[in-house]
Amino acid sequence: MNLPANFPLKKVIITVVSVVIVIALIITGVAVAVNGKAANATVDVEQVSNISTQYWGDQSSTYGNATSDFVQELYPDKEKAISKIFVKEGDTVKIGDTLLQYDTTKLQLTVESKELEEKKKKYELEQAEKELTKLQNTAPYVEPVIPEPEPEPTPTPVPESQAELYTEITEHSKPFKGAGTEEDPYVFLCTEDAVLTKGFLLKLLGVTDPRATPTPTPTPTPSAEPTAQPSEVPTATPQPTVTPEPTAEPTTAPTEAPTPAPIEPTEAPAVSSMVWFKQMTFTKTNETGGESVPTPEPDFTLPDGPFVARFEVHEQDNENLPLVKGWQMDGDKISAGFFNEVISEPDDIQMPDLSYADPGISYDTGGSMYTAEELQQMIADKKQQIQDLKLNVKQAAHDLEKAKLDLENATIKSTVNGVVKSLTDLDTAMSTSSPFLVVSGGDGFYITASLNESLLGKVHVGDTVMASSWENGQMYAAEIVQISDFPNDNSDYYYDGSSNPNSSTYQFTARIADADGLKNGMGLDITLQAASDNASNAIYLFKAYIRSDDGGKYVLKVGDDNRVHKTYIKTGKTIYNQYLEIKSDTLTEEDYVAFPYGTSAIDGAKANGMEENTDENDGIDARGLDA
């Protein structure tokens, strides 16, 4: 911007500086107001331990019966090989005594096989999920828009042919253009199978046929005065001249030329391998065998050569249409050559232009050839396949866990205090589907019930279950002494809705140490506690104390300055619909947090409600921080 010479520049500078100062004062005032509000605000806080809980695992309920005469039965297993049996029939055993040992080599191979099967199922699931992602990112095929065909242009009328078409070119054939020179040769319109006659070739080459018939010379009329005898006209074969008789009025009579002797045809000289020779004569014999009658003279005769001639074949035999092929001969140089265009092969193969292709034909252009409906169906089918593969992965994991349990439980121990009632060979037990080893117990009470397959690996031998009797209202603690390796034939057990009722169940046995008030066959409700991997370490904070913004989930945590500050956290699963798992290490049970809603819940507010240590000498609050 150009300012006039007398413009007050000093006033402009003063104005700009004043505006900047005003803006700075406004920003400073807002910041001071905000900080002042935070400095004066007070917010109540709670210790994390008071608003959180711990998760010890899922609970599952089932139903069983109390029995005073528990029997431990071992059935033969085709997948297990027994390496050693430590008892014999009639032996007295106690709980924990070793009964037999399975071969661990075969069990280890089974575990490895199940591990490979699980990896295979997981790989299939990963591939299916990748295929689903690919299908979801695939654009559907869109029918190409076929442009309206352009109207065909009105063909330009082709002039009619003015040249004569020759199938045989003689010395009397008339070219339709040219002067016979190398620059402007004679041009003849001919067919593809046209031939050249001998007479034409002689004209082309400028050679006189030595066997041609001489032209007859008339005898002059005699006069009163003697005249010289006419000279003889040389002919191919000399013959005497017949003199006519004089009359009153002398007239000149034509001298009749003698009939030449027939000429034996001789082989014409070879001019080119592509030239067809044909003998041509302009006389014909009377049908009666009389004297030859001269043919009428043609209208046109080519001049004596040598000259240059070109022979052209055009479309529709019209010289105004494109040339099909041609051949040129030079009578002076005895040379010939084709001059029609030679179409060379392309160096590179060009892809066809499919922009105007028939839409009814499928062309592979590298894009999607599936319609939107087909893609939706394929995506739905792939999702169903993924669901099936997820079940297969779970089943493979279950089979692997069972194989590991079999390996861990390769040593079979007694689960009752009793006597080995029977011990038979494996073949007999296999053929009769009966147990090969039976231990009968006679002391205490046992509970027999079933658990869902989802609890395998979470409930173990040695775990304690709680049983309650409806009949006497008492609670009993029982220790699991056995979990069957085989699923039950049916699933008629109590189901509380916490597991899948369509899955398999496995029988387990628990021993009740204090069985006061129990009777044989009494029904019991049983509660199983499934252990969690991180049950004792995770913190589950009450959801109301967690808030989120664009940066993620956060809590207002009390800092070293006894003021709350926004602290972002990582969360996990939800339990009991009220508590959210805290996965990050930024929060412990000893920390204090504020309710993150309300006018006073701002970053920097002073914490209120923290329990101060009553010892005035150390000045340390309940969190272990300096007051």
Image: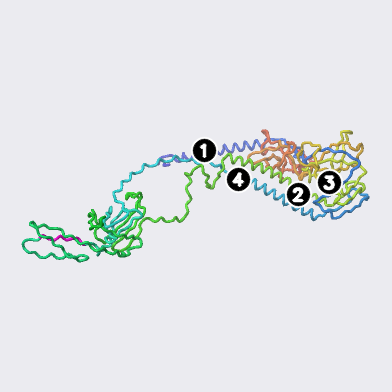
Q: CA distance from mark 3 to mark 4?
A: 47 Å
- Residue 217 highlighted magenta (yes or no): yes
Q: Furthest-left residue in view?
A: 224
Name the residue tied to disc 4: 134
Name the residue tied to disc 3: 461
Residue type at tag 1: Val
- Residue 20 highlighted magenta (yes or no): no
Residue type at tag 2: Leu
At mark 2, the secondary structure is: helix
Name the residue tied to disc 2: 400
Residue 55 placement, left or right of 415: left
Q: Are marks 2 and 1 in contact (CB under 8 Å)?
A: no
Looking at the image, is 299 positioned above or below residue 259? above
529 or 34: which is nearer to us?
A: 529
Expressed as whole percent of the image width and height from the top left, the position of residue 101 reads: 85, 53
Q: CA distance from mark 2 to mark 3?
A: 18 Å
Expressed as whole percent of the image width and height from the top left, the position of residue 280 reads: 28, 59
Residue type at tag 4: Lys
